[in-house]
Amino acid sequence: MGHNLLKGKRGIIFGALDENSIAWKVAERVVEEGAAITLTNAPAALRFGEINKLAEKLKAEVIPADATSLPDLENLFTKSMEILGGKLDFVLHSIGMSVNMRKKKDYTELNYEWMMKTLDISAISFHKVMATGLKLDAFNEWGSVLALSYIAAQRVFPDYSEMAEAKALLESFARSFGYHLATKKKVRVNTISQSPTITTAGSGVKGFNAFYEYANTMSPLGNAPADNCADYCVAMFSDLTRYVTMQNLFHDGGFSNMGMNPALLDL
Ligand code: NAI
């Protein structure tokens, strides 16, 4: 049951592929809290994903956009404002893809063209989203922009490969662009660093299941589920967090501050 925390607010949700997607859960929760949204994903993902099911359920329109394409993003922001009837109060960037990981390239032998594509999709697209919103004057004051990150931005997780660099860049964009959106528009920008979560992107990481179990045991509260991540996003989009900006916020059951958990010795 919602609490009208986002009543009257408008937003764009990137990255709902299927019902396991973190963005899928966020879309459901923000609508439950009274927001009106548009949904978007890359044209290819619209073909093999299930976003139309979600759109029907939430009575939201789907606007295709490759998040690396500035013309697609301009179209997305323009149409979203038309459909929703005004400027936007929030945006969720829930996008990640590693070409080298997908093609099983070892980290020490990365293909650099593929790496550029990975960085463009997983991190530079976040800059492009914010730059487009700013250029089109699409944000309401006290708006909130979020992207999803992972702790491999700070610590070494060898199987996370080039996505570690992508997440480090993503978090840096949240700080740097956060400054500009705060001073120009009073809009806040943050990243949420989420626990391992069973989704299409998550399961693409080598040895994901063992890794998921390891994090689950190391975290005193256990891994943070996707539904709770959606709750956190609602809080960050609501007016209760207006002065939180340029932060990387861990949503990980305590994992990021652990050194050793004796429970791991029993594994
Ligand atoms: P997912 O596979 O459901 O979502 C990834 C989305 O990125 C998909 O909807 C995909 O179509 C979209 N995407 C890929 N290329 C795109 C492009 N060029 N333009 C627009 N969209 C594009 O997986 P998940 O886990 O929900 O991922 C969402 C975010 O959460 C990602 O940033 C991921 O790195 C992050 N995250 C995931 C964790 C996990 O263990 N699943 C842990 C921490 C962060």
Image (cartoon, rainbow, N blue to C red):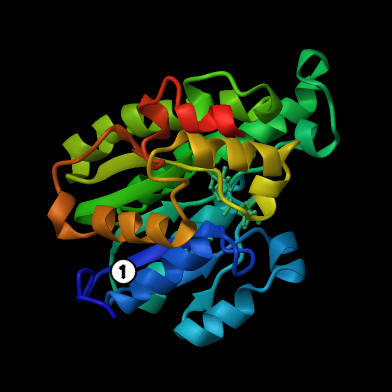
Tell me the quarter of the image containing the N terminus. Answer: bottom left
**Residue 125's x, y, as percent?**
54, 41
Residue extending farthest to the top is 108
Q: Is residue 263 left or right of residue 187?
A: right
- 89 or 242: nearer the eye? 242
- Which amino acid is tagged 1? Arg
Considering depth in this image, is 231 or 237 the residue closer to the camera?
Answer: 231
The C terminus lies in which quarter of the figure?
top right
Q: Say which residue appears at 46% left-offset and 86% top-offset.
A: 59
Q: Nearer the viewer, residue 88 or 74?
A: 88
As displayed, is residue 127 above or below residue 94? Answer: above
**Element on which disc 1 rests:** strand
Task: Classify residue 19 by image quadrant.
Answer: bottom right
Q: Which residue is more in the foreground, 233 or 71?
A: 233
**Residue depicted at x 74% and y 37%:** 207
The spot of residue 27 in percent (x, y) is 44, 69
Q: From what the image shows, is residue 137 above or below residue 33?
A: above
Q: Residues within 10 Å of mark 1 (few under 14, many from 20)?
A: many
Q: Is residue 201 left or right of residue 143?
A: right
Q: Residue furthest front?
A: 266
Q: Above or below — where is 8 with respect to 76? A: below
Name which residue lies at 60% across and 42% down.
Answer: 213
For residue 78, say whether it is visible. no
Circle 1 residue: 10
